[in-house]
Amino acid sequence: MKYIKYLVLGTVFGIVLTKAELISWFRIFEMFKFQAFHMYGVIGSAVVVGIIITRFIKARKIKSLSGDPIEIAPKKFSYPRYLIGGTIFGLGWALTGACPGPLFVQVGNGYLVMLVAIASGLLGTYVYGLLRNKLPH
């Protein structure tokens, strides 16, 4: 019963992504070919909302549902981090047609081949953990 709220939120998230056509490979293909504004509008809106919510949380010192303070650790700016990491992320997105959140929604919609992409992402995360100290940050 403790995790019901996460199941409900995840289901709502999946329905929204599906109805907004954000898991559609054709929508992502349009975006990479600069043929439609649909995905850029959604991503841009998400960035703006994320910035506003983050500022609000920091300004009001809002606590989590369990009462713990929400702490957002500052990160050092690093060109290699963003260039290499962003390139790898973009290549994975272009190859699979989805970023991590929509992968689970696609599996929920019956595209079971996306389990391969999820397993690959988990493997990549594991390898990153092994090599983390040797990579530029």
Image (cartoon, rainbow, N blue to C red):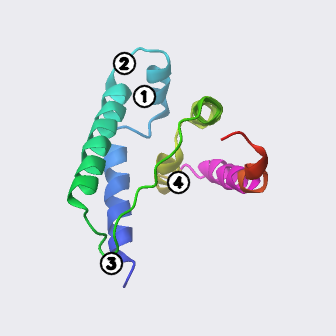
Q: Earlier in the sequence, mark 1 or mark 3?
A: 1
Q: For residue 119: magenta?
A: yes
User: Contact (CB < 8 A) between labels 2 and 4?
Assistant: no
* Dot 2 alpha-carbon crowd within 10 angstroms: few under 14, some 14 to 19, many 20 or more: some
Q: Main secondary structure of the magenta part?
A: helix
Q: Are marks 1 and 3 in contact (CB under 8 Å)?
A: no
Q: Which amino acid is tagged 2?
A: Ala
Query: Along the polypeptide, which appears first: circle 4 or circle 3?
Result: 3
Q: Secondary structure at mark 4?
A: helix
Q: Earlier in the sequence, mark 4 or mark 1?
A: 1
Check contact, mark 2 vs mark 1: CB within 8 A.
yes
Q: Residue at x 30, y 42 (%)?
A: 51
Task: In the rendered view, tell whether residue 35 sits above or below residue 93.
Answer: above
User: In the picture shown, does residue 109 fall above or below 86?
Assistant: below
Task: Read off the residue under disc 1.
Answer: 27
Rounded to the nearest whole Å, what is the CA distance between mark 4 and mark 3?
A: 31 Å
Q: Which residues are magenta?
A: 111-127
- Sequence-wise first label, 2 or 3: 2
Image coords of residue 124 (percent x, y): 71, 49
Q: CA distance from mark 2 to mark 3?
A: 42 Å
Residue at image mark 3: 66
Check whether the beta carbons of the residues at disc 4 and disc 1 lie within 8 A of each other.
no
**Which is in the foreground here, disc 2 or disc 4?**
2
Whether the residues at callouts 4 and 3 have beta carbons within 8 Å, the answer is: no
Q: Secondary structure at mark 2?
A: loop
Upstream in the sequence, badge 2 or badge 4? Answer: 2
Task: Find residue 65 and report its horizontal and vertical position in percent.
Answer: 29, 73
Task: Please give left or right for residue 106 compared with residue 123 in the image.
Answer: left
Q: Which mark is residue 107?
A: 4
